[in-house]
Amino acid sequence: MLWTRMELPCWCLLLLSCLQSLSAHNDFFTSIGQMTDLLYTEKDLVTSLKDYIRAEENKLERVKRWADKLDSLTATATQDPEGFLGHPVNAFKLMKRLNTEWGDLESLVLSDTTDGFISNLTIQRQYFPTEEDQTGAAKALLRLQDTYKLDANTISTGDLPGVKHKSQMTVEDCYELGKIAYSDADYYHTELWMAQALKQLDKGEESSIDKVTVLDYLSYAIYQQGEIERALEYTLRLLKLDPEHQRAKGNVKYFEFQLEKQKKEETARTQEESGKGVTSEKNKKKKQNNSFSLIPERKKYEMLCRGEGLKMTPRRQSRLFCRYYNNNRHPRFVLAPVKQQDEWDRPYIVRYLDIISDAEIEKVKQLAKPRLRRATVHDPQTGKLTTAQYRVSKSAWLTGYEDPVIERINERIEGITGLEVDTAEELQVANYGVGGQYEPHFDFGRKDEPDAFKELGTGNRIATWLFYMSDVTAGGATVFPDVGAAVWPKKGTAVFWYNLFASGEGDYSTRHAACPVLVGNKWVSNKWIHERGQEWRRPCGLNETE
């Protein structure tokens, strides 16, 4: 057993590089880039587990050989015990076996081959994802389900657009999603996922979760949404499987009482409305209209993420062009103008194609990855940076003096925009996590946030430059809900827009969002350019919206 004990230092060395990168991080679910480290961690664990299995199999093989040998020997010996032991060698070997060899066998059987595996597991467990990560990833699935109007079965079977590695969900997976929704009193999603778990159980899928447990959650979730009749149906089905289920027995009586009460109230209300000449249908319609008007931006945002946004009129579209751009014969671009493409007219959004090379992208990612931390947002109440559920990503900041590539990128942004970048913020690199998103927000500070960038001393954010550093298989668009614009990620391109009018007033039409990533890995980097230093580069306008 010496070899298993000797292997531990080797495994520690093998894992060291991976664990160093994991040790400083948490919130794994907020960055796909950092989650890749976990795959290598799991691969190392599997290798260690296989070594343990081989050692255990080797031990069992030795025990089996010993047992087979003795089985044959004792079968022969017991047929004529005295004759067998009459041979002095047989007598000696019996004494030796019982005095020494059976003791060796006992040591072999009692030997622990788990040391190497358990030690590796213990070392790595401290860097495993937490309960928060599991919950965060589960909520991301629910968010994707809502944004992209996916039914539970589509997600469970893994039939998502453009997937390379299809993966199906088990009953346990569906049940876990339902439980997480239930713990948040999200009975809508509880119903969807408990129903999916039940559907898979009905199809005969083997599971440690039984139908009674699923039906218990399902009926309660449906009841909480006001559908008492359906809740009663599922409760009665539960009682057929478990007639002694005490809670279900009580619920049946309660549901039946509530249904009877509802019928009486409905009858009385119908009679009253008939006398007033008002139909319940009109009331229902009015309710629906009121509830819809409460969430217009959210609805527009989700529509744009699905590619169902507003379409430009042909007249407006005819005014969008693509061109070779040299920024008024800038020396850097006279011989090598950049490809510029109009994406939207109001606000004016342009895209630059082939503006950052694959080698530069890899360098930026290499510099950023060890420093990625949960992205924060500016809290207007406290003036401090804080994490938020509506921004699911990790980010890092890179300065020009760290690497020539970053300095070159900054110079390129300045040359193309004609704006001073010495007063701009550092290059922010972001990697989105499971269902990664950034809900509608402004980049500039509004009038009710006079101290938004006070500590920088460089004024408001005049413009935004956004690099797309990866293609995204599905989802991940940058959308502008107020105007109906959607810009889709394309690796090696960048988009640019002004957040402020020339007068310095904020352009509220630039309110934008990053849609949840449905399939793929989204890397972006952005430069927020500030007002200071632009006095001669972008002179003030004479009216507010100029």
Image (spheres, helix red, strand yellow):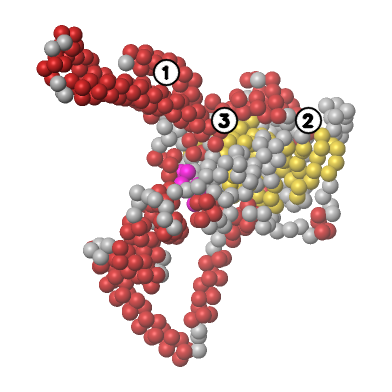
User: Mark 3: which amino acid?
Assistant: Ala
Q: Nearer the viewer, residue 145 or 89?
A: 89
Mark 3 vs mark 2, foreground winner is 3
Q: Nearer the viewer, residue 308 or 279?
A: 308
Q: Which of the 4 image quadrants contains residue 72? A: top left
Name the residue tied to disc 2. Answer: 415
Give the mark, 3 or 2, whose residue is nearer the N terminus. Answer: 3
Q: CA distance from mark 1 to mark 3?
A: 29 Å
SS at circle 1: helix
Residue 352 placement (x, y as % from top left): 77, 38
Mark 1 vs mark 3, foreground winner is 1
Query: Which residue occupies the extreme bottom position in the image?
Result: 275
Name the residue tied to disc 3. Answer: 396
**Left/right of residue 83 with respect to residue 51 in the rendered view:** left
Name the residue tied to disc 1. Answer: 12
Does residue 373 show up magenta in the picture? no
User: Mark 2: which amino acid?
Assistant: Gly
Give the mark, 2 or 1, whose residue is nearer the N terminus. Answer: 1
Is the Cβ of the residue at disc 3 closer than 8 Å to that at disc 2? Answer: no
Q: Which residues are magenta?
A: 136-142
